[in-house]
Image: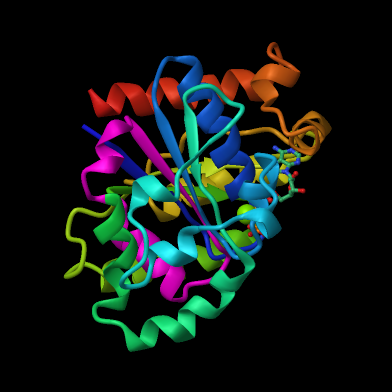
Amino acid sequence: MTRIYAMANQKGGVGKTTNCFNLAAALAERGQRVLLVDCDPQCSLTAALGVSVLELKRSLYDLLFDDGPHLGEVVLSTRMSGVDLIPSHPKLAEADLQLLTVLEPQKRLAYQINGRSASDYDFVLIDCLPSLGTLMVNALVAADEVLVPYLPTPLSTAALPYLFSTMDRLYRLNPKLRVFGIIPSIVDTRTKVPRVELDRLRRLYPRLRILPSINKGVALERAMGLRISILEYMPHSTQAATYRELARILIEAAT
Ligand SMILES: Nc1ncnc2c1ncn2[C@@H]1O[C@H](COP(=O)(O)OP(=O)(O)OP(=O)(O)O)[C@@H](O)[C@H]1O
Ligand SMILES: [Mg+2]
């Protein structure tokens, strides 16, 4: 059965795109078929996969509106074997307003992704934009579960309730939605702050699953710049090991 995860946090720059990209690589390494959905008008994930948005005929934007193509017509294969992509487009930035005119604007992505073509995949990972608007709501309504990249700092902790209350408000539209876990990301192991903040997070949300942390490391940025995963760029790094561990956890939870 296809498992659909939204990589979501309305805070910017917390590792959503980096985690989608490298987690997809780790899942594919274990023989899983993965569909990445770039739900961010910044198009970072699309660019990281080497797709030039200016040359795109179709993107997620077209999928969200009536009379558009169906999923299979928008999916691109990528140079990562086993990983396909629904690319984004800068005009997705206008979707928030334009979706006001369509029926059930929050369900557009769900309608496409829960259809037949997505069942070809073991995992769908939706890279969300840093905002709690209609696009993010579409991702949360389409998803089974949410992975929350989280920078262990007091400000990030203070921002989490807004994400959780948005999820609560969507209960009627997607009653199955839950947080699969928090992924502490870009964790600077040279200071005490992340450890202290993670302890505080555990006390604040004792039932929240804290997944393995992705440590801060320049190799991850370099790898993204080269459009390859950390698993390919530095297969023996701690970050590669953590993405493999996360993939193992997701696969185990799906079976
Ligand atoms: N573990 C890491 N170590 C070092 N740098 C990282 C790590 N993870 C991400 N980065 C870098 O941090 C920056 C933000 O990461 P990323 O783009 O993945 O965040 P994001 O949450 O998707 O941002 P946005 O909210 O803008 O979409 C990028 O420059 C990325 O290369
Ligand atoms: Mg991003």
Residue 171 sits in quarter: bottom left
Residue 119 in percent (x, y) is at 25, 37
Q: Give the residue drawn at x 48%, y 77%.
A: 95
Residue range corresponding to the magenta coloring: 114-143
For the point 20% across and 68% down, which residue is it? 173
Q: Is residue 61 left or right of residue 155?
A: left
Quadrant of image for the N terminus? top left
Asked whether the viewer can see residue 13, the reply is no
- The answer to which of 37 and 145 lies nearer the viewer is 37
Q: Quadrant of residue 185?
A: top right
Q: Residue 229 lies in what quarter of the image?
A: top right
Q: Residue at x 24, y 50 (%)?
A: 114
Instruction: Please tell me whether residue 13 is drawn above or below residue 173 in the rendered image.
Output: above
**Visible residue check, residue 132:** yes
Side (left or right) of 41 relative to 124: right
Left or right placement of residue 31 versus residue 242 in this view: left
Q: Give the colour scheme of this rendering.
A: rainbow
Percent position of residue 64, x then y: 38, 67
Q: How many marks?
A: 0
Nearest the camera: 71 or 80?
A: 71
| Residue sitting farthest toward the top | 236
Residue 123 in magenta?
yes
